[in-house]
């Protein structure tokens, strides 16, 4: 498998404040021929600088608390964190996190999450996904009693909005222009009776149009 950097392995930048945790995660990465560990930092606050220098494909970030997640030039992030709130998880997904797993996730889960993140897929721990569904279910956004069905392409765009992708990223993934994506989003908002992208995603989740 050729990566964006032209090599045969996915380049991973690791961040963890714990030396013990860092060593354990490094071992998992080094045991797989699918990955190349390009660097390890002792703070998630250092990710931006090191990512710019090392050009990883995926960031594996170990969080010991709910610190802010900052987008790093569109790089996918796999976050390891215990018992995050639904609000933190939602913000993390908007900021480029593609996978959220508990810190004691097994090596197979972590490996699968990195592969999924690299290909642009979102992978959530079931407990975290359930929290987000419950949070959305308690929102005040009203589900329309009737609405015009979305087209298959509009459903694709709505799912990518739920991933937190920007118009340009959606356009690149679908191989179309920014203008086309703006048209699809406008149509989605109109059909769902939503005024913002966030409201459209909230409605999509509550109506079963988006599967986490």
Image (cartoon, rainbow, N blue to C red):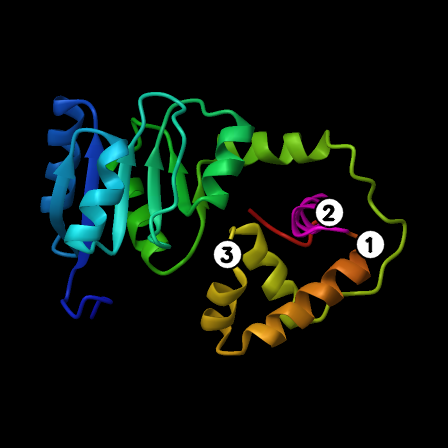
Quarter where residue 80 is shown: top left
Q: Residue at x 17, y 35 (%)?
A: 25
The residue tagged 2 is 203
**Viewer can see residue 63:** yes
Relative to 160, is 39 above or below? above
Distance in Å between CA atoms under marks 3 and 1: 21 Å
The residue tagged 3 is 165
The residue tagged 1 is 193
Compare residues 92 and 1 and report the one nearer the observer: 92
Q: Residue at x 75, y 67 (%)?
A: 187
| Image spot of residue 85 (x, y percent) | 51, 25
The reply, left or right, for residue 25 in relation to residue 81 is: left
Helix, strand or loop under label 1: loop
| Image spot of residue 95 (x, y percent) | 45, 44
Mark closer to the chain start, 2 or 3: 3
Distance in Å between CA atoms under marks 2 and 3: 17 Å
Q: Nearer the viewer, mark 2 or mark 3?
A: 3
The reply, left or right, for residue 76 in relation to residue 128 is: left
| Magenta-colored span | 195-206
Quarter where residue 102 is shown: top left
The reply, left or right, for residue 161 in relation to residue 103 is: right
Structural crowding at the residue carrying mark 1, measured as other residues with C-alpha within 10 Å and reported as few (<14), some (14–19) or many (≥20): some
């Amino acid at each position: 498998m050729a990566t964006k950097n032209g090599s045969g392995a996915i380049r991973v930048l690791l961040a963890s404040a714990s030396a013990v945790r860092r060593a354990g995660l490094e071992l998992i990465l080094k045991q797989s021929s699918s990955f190349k560990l390009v660097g390890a930092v002792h703070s998630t606050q250092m990710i931006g600088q090191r990512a710019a220098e090392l050009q990883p494909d995926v960031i594996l970030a170990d969080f010991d608390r709910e610190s802010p997640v900052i987008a790093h030039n569109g790089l996918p992030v796999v976050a390891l964190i215990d018992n995050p709130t639904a609000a933190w998880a939602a913000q993390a997904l908007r900021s480029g996190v593609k996978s959220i797993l508990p810190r004691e996730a097994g090596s197979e889960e972590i490996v699968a999450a990195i592969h999924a993140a690299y290909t642009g897929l979102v992978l959530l721990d079931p407990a975290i996904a359930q929290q987000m569904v419950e949070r959305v279910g308690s929102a005040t956004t009203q589900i329309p009693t009737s609405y015009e069905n979305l087209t298959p392409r509009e459903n694709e765009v709505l799912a990518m909005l739920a991933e937190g992708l920007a118009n340009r990223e959606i356009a690149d993934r679908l191989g179309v222009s920014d203008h086309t994506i703006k048209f699809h989003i406008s149509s989605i908002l109109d059909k769902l009776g939503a005024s913002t992208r966030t409201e459209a995603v909230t409605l999509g989740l509550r109506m079963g149009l988006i599967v986490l």
